[in-house]
């Protein structure tokens, strides 16, 4: 009987030793999350009212701004828009107070928002690069019916360059 036990124990041990080993693969390393976009460059914060809002329902007092266009921009859809500045505090962009903020209307409906920062050339280039990086590497794009862009205005010989963020409602613009 002792031999039978020894035979059973040996058989059991040899079965364990000859069983295929399961390879243990470590779990894959977690994929790092993409860096969070800098909220200071989020264009959504520039919208104080939804596109299509009626002029008379805008928050705060507005004052009309006359815009002059040269022939190169004459075919731009801004020709038939009435633009207004606001007397209320404007939103910030790039962690700075805006130097210009226009709400533009066509047939008394909000169709375009233009925000301007005037910066030293090195700062302007940096703000432009950081805004494009925050917008997934694009300096323009579209989200739903809203198109967005950021650009440097042409050098006018002034010591500061305007960085212009433009938001448009594609459904309301021709």
Image: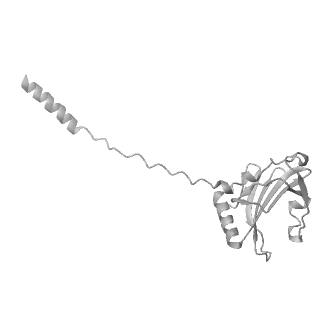
> Residue 90 occupies which quadrant of the picture?
bottom right
Residue furthest to the top in view is: 1
Q: Is residue 19 above or below residue 60?
A: above
Q: Is residue 114 above or below residue 17?
A: below
Q: Position of residue 138 (x, y in %)?
A: 67, 60
Q: Position of residue 17 (x, y in %)?
A: 20, 38
Quadrant holding the N terminus: top left
Residue 42 seen in this snapshot: yes
**Residue at horizontal 72%, vertical 58%?**
93
Q: Looking at the image, which is closer to me, 92 or 156? A: 92
> Residue 37 occupies which quadrant of the picture?
bottom right
**Residue at horizontal 89%, vertical 49%?**
55
Residue 174 seen in this snapshot: no
Residue furthest to the bottom in view is: 157
Image-based side of 55 in relation to 5, left or right: right
Q: Looking at the image, which is closer to me, 101 or 167? A: 101
Q: How is the image coloured?
A: one colour
Quadrant holding the C terminus: bottom right
Q: Position of residue 45 (x, y in %)?
A: 73, 51
Q: Position of residue 6 (x, y in %)?
A: 10, 29
């Amino acid at each position: 009987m002792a031999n039978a036990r020894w035979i059973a124990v040996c058989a059991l041990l040899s079965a364990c030793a000859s069983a295929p080993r399961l390879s243990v693969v470590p779990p894959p390393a977690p994929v790092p999350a993409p860096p969070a976009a800098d909220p200071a460059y989020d264009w959504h914060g520039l919208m104080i009212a939804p596109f299509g809002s009626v002029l008379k329902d805008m928050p705060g007092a507005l004052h009309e701004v006359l815009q002059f266009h040269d022939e190169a921009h004459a075919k731009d859809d801004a020709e038939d828009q009435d633009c207004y500045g606001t007397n209320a505090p404007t939103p910030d962009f790039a962690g700075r107070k805006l130097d210009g903020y226009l709400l533009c209307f066509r047939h008394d409906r909000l169709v375009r928002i233009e925000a301007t920062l005037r910066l030293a050339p090195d700062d302007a280039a940096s703000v432009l690069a950081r805004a494009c990086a925050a917008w997934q590497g694009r300096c323009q794009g579209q989200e739903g019916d809203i198109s967005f862009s950021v650009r440097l205005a042409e050098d006018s010989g002034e010591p500061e360059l305007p960085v212009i963020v433009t938001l448009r409602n594609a459904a309301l613009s021709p």
